[in-house]
Amino acid sequence: MPVARPAPARRPKILIASHDLKFLSLALEWLRDEDRYDFLIDKWAASLKHDEATSEALLSEADVIFAEWCGGQAVWYSQRKRPGQKMFIRLHRFEAFTPAPHQVQINNVDGVIVVSSFFRDYCHRTFGWPLEKIVVIPQYCVAAQFRRPKYDGAAHTLGLVGINDSRKRPHLALDVLRHVRRAEPRFRLRIRSVMPWDIAWVWNKPQQKSYYRDLFEMVRTDPLLADAVLFDRPGPNMAEWFRNIGYLLSTSESEGCHTSVSEALCSGSRAAVIDWDGAADLYPEYVGASASELAESILSMDRAGLSCAEAKEIMDRAAGSFDITRLLNQLRTWFG
């Protein structure tokens, strides 16, 4: 954990407004432990639904407003921020394609965090937000937790996290596995995910159900895939799971920054990332345009091997880009 600064004489009151704190909760815990700030939480029922009287009361107390997600809360507070208050927003991904950012009063906002340079440029171009107000900080992880020795067999194990929506395109991961196994049959694929039939909104859609039935039939019948794909249930022990993984695949249609990739790099794994918007800025050495390109990249890395020094370099670079300290330092600067 980073060394905390001395606490100020009067602790600033930080108002956190959000319908979902799952991507911020750990950072808030660390900041609370420093005992520098008084936190006020405005928990919205949904991105566009809240108790306005509660929000008004909290607004009257706050020194700093932080909207986690650029949804209705960012719009509401940007339109009501008072003189002397500061306001900041963190935009992830999906909000960029909703009406909310267009409605934010950016002149009342002191800074915005986005998860990639793609979204920085998109927000500047689409909403007219000044570049000097936008800071790029990908979703964080605690890098030190992932520095663990790999298990035997990790060098020839591909990993994929999350297949609970067809937009994750797990069929492309299977294509990658086929390609690499033609050249090196030791390769396997481990998929860590909730199963699609466990999610009602996915499994109740005929198109989704058909996609996954075809996918699992492919795994069962294709000789290059049968006995080469292992499914792992999700859980909190991601750092332990990454000890099995040599290469993390990202085959989605779109992502914000795909935190699983950054976690994999922090563990010393390498990656193979399809070229979704923003991927080349975050993971330039690991991006390819197709499953065959990703497979060739993996085979090339496999032939070159990976020394302990090279693995350490991967982990060190990833920690510099994705460790929680980047966000904490920015928030301390903003919060005072």
Image: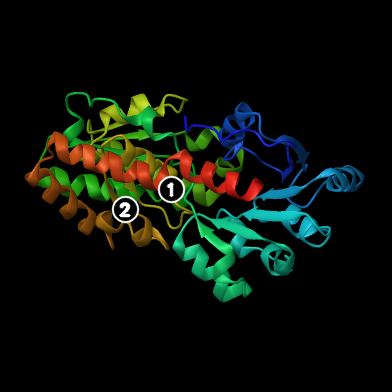
Q: Amino acid at mark 1?
A: His
Q: Classify 10 Å Cα crowding around label 2: few (below 14), some (14-19), many (20 and above).
A: many
Residue placed at 39% from the left, 51% from the top? 169
Residue 36 — which label? Answer: none
Q: Is residue 200 visible?
A: yes
267 up-or-down from 128: above or below: above
Label 2 with label 1: CB-CB less than 8 Å: yes
Viewer-closest of 22 and 62: 62
Left or right relative to 244: residue 94: right
Helix, strand or loop for disc 2 = strand
105 up-or-down from 140: above or below: below
Viewer-closest of 176 and 36: 36
Whole-angstrom CA distance, mark 2 to mark 1, is: 10 Å
Viewer-closest of 13 and 286: 13
Q: Which residue is mark 1?
A: 258
x and y percentages locating residue 45 in the rendered image: 78, 42
Left or right relative to 327: residue 71: right
Q: Is residue 275 visible?
A: no
Q: Which residue is mark 2?
A: 273
Q: Classify 10 Å Cα crowding around label 1: few (below 14), some (14-19), many (20 and above).
A: some
Q: Amino acid at mark 2?
A: Val
x and y percentages locating residue 164 in the rendered image: 48, 41
Res. 332 image quadrant? top right
Residue placed at 32% from the left, 31% from the top? 242
Left or right relative to 188: residue 105: right
x and y percentages locating residue 233 in the rendered image: 43, 26
105 up-or-down from 251: above or below: below
First in sequence: mark 2 or mark 1?
Answer: 1
Res. 84 image quadrant? bottom right
